Image: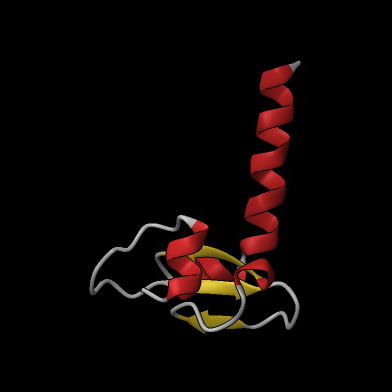
Amino acid sequence: MSDQDRDAGLPSTGTETEYWYNDRTGEVEVGPQSLAIDRIGPFKTREEAERALEIVAERAAEWRAESD
């Protein structure tokens, strides 16, 4: 785990591969490669990371519904 990830309070899963969606570039990254502010994740699969924006929108809608 990098110092940047540790400082951000992100959990480490050891040797398990993690996928991240880079919101700035629109690309999926294997492991955290970019600045934390530019990425969403981690996700367990590349397919989940590719759907990151959709997943975030779904979760936000669920949270809004719960607060109503």
Q: Position of residue 64 (x, y in %)?
A: 74, 28
Q: In the rendered image, which quarter contains the N terminus?
A: bottom left
Q: In the figure, is residue 40 to the left or right of 47? A: right
- Residue furthest to the left: 15
Q: Is residue 6 left or right of residue 16?
A: right
Residue furthest top in the image: 68
- Within the image, what quadrant is residue 38 found in? bottom right
2 vs 68, left or right, is left
- Give residue 26's quadrant in the image: bottom right
Nearer the observer, 1 or 59 = 1
In the depicted structure, whether residue 40 falls above or below residue 55: below
Residue 5 drawn above or below residue 2: above
Residue 2: percent from the left, percent from the top?
41, 76
Q: Residue at x 70, y 61 (%)?
A: 53
Q: Residue at x 24, y 69 (%)?
A: 14
Residue 11 on image: x %, y %: 37, 57
Residue positioned 53% across, 82% down in the render: 29
Closer to the camera in the image, 34 or 28: 34
Numbered label tally: 0
Task: Say whether residue 24 is left or right of residue 33.
Answer: right
Quadrant where the C terminus lies?
top right
**What kind of colouring is applied to the model shown?**
secondary structure
Residue 36 higher or lower than 30, as above or below: above
